[in-house]
């Protein structure tokens, strides 16, 4: 969402001559983290890690079968481990969010977790602290890494674009890359401003690739191209402001805009116009959202994942 970026003045205003340096995007740790390329990459019972889940479809008596296989993200040759159950006691999730994890297709969930102790049957539960659900039907592309994104603190004061005021950190590693912005590559009538906001400010995770963006006076943008976004659960709208609105005059209709927090914000009263009789098909796993927009008062559509609307 941040598209401007920066030349950073490095010399004192009193010094002559004045030297300036571009805020060049790059990996602040000089490349891939060594911990992300080891062959011994199995989730442990001592340290929390970000892992994906795969349902165990084998046919045998529980708890030896019927649980999940888990493996670390961003690791070379990660070792899958079997867990008999998911333990949400440390995650502070509501019932709908726990169901969103347990009902998700393989690969559409990331959890921050560690193995529980061995029980009397010789199996372990997966102890979960945080859970993230991805957009239905999407997944990482070949070569993608998993990232968390945060705002730089303190922010850079930018004099020319591009300005890398975000940082992308590889999960299960220490490598951090300066970042200009996040770009949502998924095309499914999703509200990209909402997903970008969740990634850049609200803790959502990304599977994607960091690449050069547009070129400005200070150099190229450093853009995280997201092929999958994992929303941190629970996902809630808002907080949304409350409005007291007078009814629109006869012959007019109220229009709205939708904020990056999924709030419906009143826009204007506009004259009623003939509208095309079109209805968007969102597809499996999605819910259609429609609202009247200016200037015509006709409906605009977006597709939200169903799991954010608990039944």
Image (cartoon, rainbow, N blue to C red):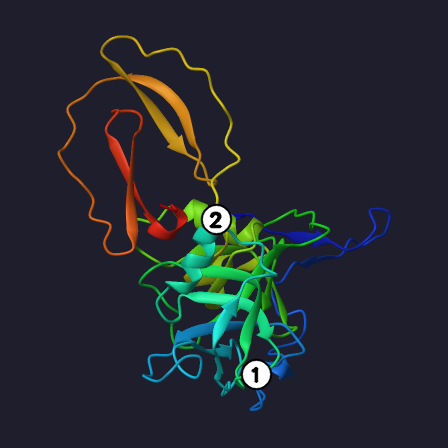
Name the outermost residue toward the bottom.
39
Quick check: can you spot residue 198? yes
At numbered mark 1, what does the secondary structure look like: helix, strand or loop?
loop
| Residue at position x 25%, y 8% in the image | 250
Image coordinates of residue 22 in percent, x first then y, are 65, 59
Of 1 and 217, the residue lying toward us: 1
Residue that mark 1 sits on? 120
Task: Using the image as rendered, state which of residue 7 and residue 247 is in the foreground.
Answer: 247
The quadrant of the rendering that contains the C terminus is top left
Q: In the rendered structure, are the residues bearing label 2 and label 1 in contact, judged by CB atoms less than 8 Å apart?
A: no
Mark toward the viewer: 2 or 1: 1
Residue at 53% x, 54% y: name it. Answer: 93
Asked if one can make out residue 223 in the rendered structure from this viewpoint, the answer is no
Q: Is residue 257 above or below residue 279?
A: above
Q: In the rendered image, which residue does mark 2 sit on?
A: 235
| x and y percentages locating residue 3 in the rendered image | 52, 48
**Above/below status of 308 relative to 52:** above
Identify the residue shown where x is 65% and y is 53%: 7
Whole-percent x and y of residue 192? 40, 48
Q: Nearer the viewer, residue 255 or 209?
A: 255
Q: Left or right: 95 with respect to 90?
A: left
Instruction: Specify the quadrant of the image occupied by residue 117.
Output: bottom right
In the rendered image, residue 23, in percent from the top left (x then y), is placed at 65, 58
Q: Earlier in the sequence, mark 2 or mark 1?
A: 1
């Amino acid at each position: 969402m941040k598209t401007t970026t920066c030349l950073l003045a490095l010399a004192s205003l009193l010094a002559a001559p004045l030297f300036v340096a571009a805020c060049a995007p790059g990996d602040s740790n000089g490349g891939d983290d060594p911990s992300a390329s080891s062959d011994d990459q199995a989730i442990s019972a001592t340290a929390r890690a970000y892992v994906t889940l795969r349902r165990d479809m084998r046919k045998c008596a529980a708890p030896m079968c019927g649980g999940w296989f888990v493996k670390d993200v961003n690791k070379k040759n990660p070792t899958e481990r079997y867990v008999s159950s998911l333990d949400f006691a440390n995650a502070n999730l509501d019932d709908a969010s726990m169901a969103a994890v347990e009902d998700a297709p393989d690969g559409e969930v990331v959890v921050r977790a560690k193995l529980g102790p061995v029980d009397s049957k010789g199996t372990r539960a997966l102890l979960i602290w945080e859970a993230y659900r991805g957009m239905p039907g999407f997944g990482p592309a070949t070569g993608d890494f998993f990232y968390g994104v945060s705002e730089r603190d303190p922010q850079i004061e930018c004099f020319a674009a591009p300005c890398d005021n975000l940082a992308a950190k590889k999960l299960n590693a220490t490598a951090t890359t300066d970042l200009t912005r996040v770009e949502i590559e998924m095309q499914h009538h999703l509200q990209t401003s909402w997903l970008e906001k969740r990634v850049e400010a609200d803790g959502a995770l990304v599977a994607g690739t960091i690449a050069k963006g547009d070129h400005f006076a200070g150099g190229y943008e450093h853009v995280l191209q997201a092929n999958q976004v994992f929303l941190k659960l629970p996902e809630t709208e808002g907080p949304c402001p409350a409005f007291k609105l007078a009814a629109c005059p006869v012959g007019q209709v109220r229009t709205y805009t939708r904020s990056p927090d999924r709030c419906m914000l009143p826009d204007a009263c506009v004259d009623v116009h003939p509208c095309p009789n079109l209805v968007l098909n969102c597809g499996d796993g999605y819910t259609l959202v429609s609202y009247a927009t200016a200037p015509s008062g006709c409906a605009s559509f977006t597709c939200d994942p169903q799991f954010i609307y608990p039944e």
